[in-house]
Amino acid sequence: MKQMTPAKLLLLLLLTYTVSGKAENDLGFFRKKSAPTLKDTVKINELYDCFLQFRATEPARAKACLKQSIALAEALDLPQQKMLLYNDMGTFYDINGMADSAFHFLHLSLELAQLHNDQERIGMAYKNIGIVYYDIADYANAMSNFVTSLKIHEKNNNQKGIADAYIWMGIVNEFGLQKYRKALDYHRQALAIYEQLNADERKAYSYNNIGNCYNKLQMPDSAIYYFNRSLEIKIKRKDSISIGNTYNNIGTVYYDNGQYRKSLEYYQQSLAYRIKANDLSGIASCHINIGNVYLQLKDYGKALESHTEARRICEQIAYNDGLMAALDGLATTFAAKGDFQNAYTTRLEHERIKDSVFNIQSVQQMEELQVQYDTEKKENQIVQQKLKLSRRNLMIGALSAIFLLSLLTFYLIYNRYKLRQERRLQEELLKEEEKRTRAMLETEENERQRLARELHDGVGQLLTASRLMLNPLYTNAQTPEENKQQIKQTIDILDDSILEIRNISHNMVPDILQKYGLEKAIRHFTDRIRQMRKIDIQVESHELDESKLDVTSQLMLYRIVQEAVNNALKYAEAGRIHIQLTADENELSVMIEDNGKGFDVNQIKEKGGIGMRNLQLRTEYLKGHLSIDSSPKSGTTIIVEIPLS
């Protein structure tokens, strides 16, 4: 969070005072009126437009305009305007790191919305209150408010509100809890809704969040893919600030993977857009990132230039987080050059700023603790008064409590017995379902093996024998030339048939899977498809330990990949297929992406196609989770996640 310097605070007070004097004259004028007029509304709108115009470039001036607008709306008692203005003042304070004031105005907006039963505003207020909690790292309260907002929007079928809540629940999991896969689920749910609403701006935001998650999961190709999708929309909308942010994110992916020249290109493009939008904090961040790149490239002169410029801007706008990063970069560069005196001096300055930020935060925490203490003190006084009144009826209450406790104990014992019985029944049903699934899959594999043997040993041997019998006729010098041509064509057809039977037999029983394991079997499978179909099909593997998978599990995963790839070739008409295998200590993930024509997932599920059913059955057999993301003309992404323990 940015902290305001004393100079900025003084400027804010002066601007507030100057505008407030005019506000008092306006209020006096409005109080003489019996009811708000069109001119009154225009005045409030003008002040609000002033706030929107200057909130990014001149926050003190923007705040003064918004305060005056609130004063006029309160004097004229305009509830709808007050709800909006209180909400914006709360978010303004949050952006500027003043959590207590943000909570105050957001709760005012919430109370007004509840009074007028404005469900959309109620849901929005809970979301914004959750954002403040998130910004002060109180993730439990943040998530609680986001869930409340989600329930309100679900009750009123407000799809945009539902998607916005999903976005923030994903952000809490991504940045607060580092649960990147959970965050990815939330961001994908939000994206699905934004696509239905055709909300391009929000789709771009979702693509960006998904890209961040993939980068955190060390999946750079997927991260770059979604960042580029986000970038396409932002360029179309000519949103300079957002374009700059996305270029910066792409640069960070390349930087994290050691591609420093490539990252420098994107950081410089980001800088150009941020300069165009006068995004000072973004400009400072770009100079810090560019300086870090030059430091890695050992171009210490340019590294010093970039970090020095970042320091100047951060000091100008009181951007302490950026200032600490710039000082850290300067100190590291000085040390790399052997200028240890400047490195030491700069490091001391870094520690001073760090201690200053810590002290400011400590003061804010103490003030909030004091408010909390006063509130709890008043609540305790009320509790004591209630206790004095309750002593008169203590005996009656005690007897009633004993009776109720007896009833409750009986109910709990009975309910526990009932739940235990239901759980046992459910476990038995699950076991039976698992047995049926296992039997069905084993029967299918046995049938595949039987057919493969019959094709190879039966039809294959007959075709081979036929070829051997024809070959002497072809090589016999006495055979007429025209008969030789017919025999040659027949031999070629037999060769093609023998090869096709071998391919079918191999697909049915992949011997390479048992000999060399899952990854090599998949690569062998894709190599044959690449040779036959001439399409771009790639396999990527990260930290895959196949020793944790038994033979049956490997076979199921191989069948899943086989089914997905065949569907992409047969139905999606894909020209590019990307298969990715990743694993950690607890989970293995298989992702199959294609650029085919896609399909409506809900429609396919309703039809209950064999391919979809096979994927689901094999995933359930592995006790995993299947996720399919597709829409017409947008390609298909299939993700299968299975536990390894």
Image (tube, rainbow, N blue to C red):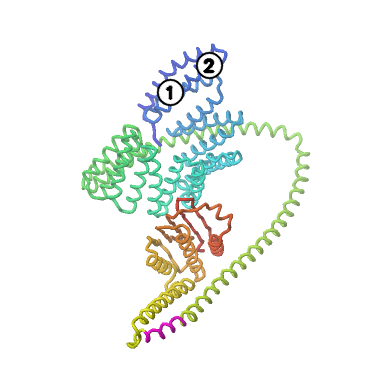
Residue type at mark 1 is Ala
Earlier residue among tags 1 and 2: 2
Which numbered circle lies on residue 544?
Answer: none
Residue named by callout 1:
64
Neighbor class of circle 2 (other Cα within 10 Å; few <14, some 14-19, many 20+) is: few
Asked whether 517 or 191 is in front, the reply is 191
**Which region is colored magenta?**
462-473
Dividing the picture into quadrants, the one containing residue 244 is top left
Camera-nearest label, 1 or 2: 2
Whether the residues at callouts 1 and 2 have beta carbons within 8 Å, the answer is: no
Query: How many labels, in total?
Result: 2
Q: Where is residue 74 in the image (x, y as percent from the top left)?
A: 53, 21
Neighbor class of circle 1 (other Cα within 10 Å; few <14, some 14-19, many 20+) is: many
Q: In the image, what residue occupies the spot 57% across and 34% down?
A: 122
Note whether 303 is above or below 636 in the view shown.
above
Q: Position of residue 70 (x, y in %)?
A: 50, 23
Q: Give the CA distance from mark 1 to mark 2.
A: 23 Å
Residue named by callout 2:
37
Element carrying mark 2: loop
Q: In the image, what residue occupies the spot 52% across and 14% down?
A: 30
Q: In the image, what residue occupies the spot 49% across and 66% down?
A: 559
Q: Where is residue 131 in the image (x, y as percent from the top left)?
A: 49, 38
Asked whether 141 or 27 is in front, the reply is 27
Note whether 623 is above or below 472 in the view shown.
above
Residue type at mark 2 is Thr
Q: In the image, what residue occupies the spot 48% across and 73% down?
A: 509
Which of the image's four quarters has the N terminus? top left
Element carrying mark 1: helix
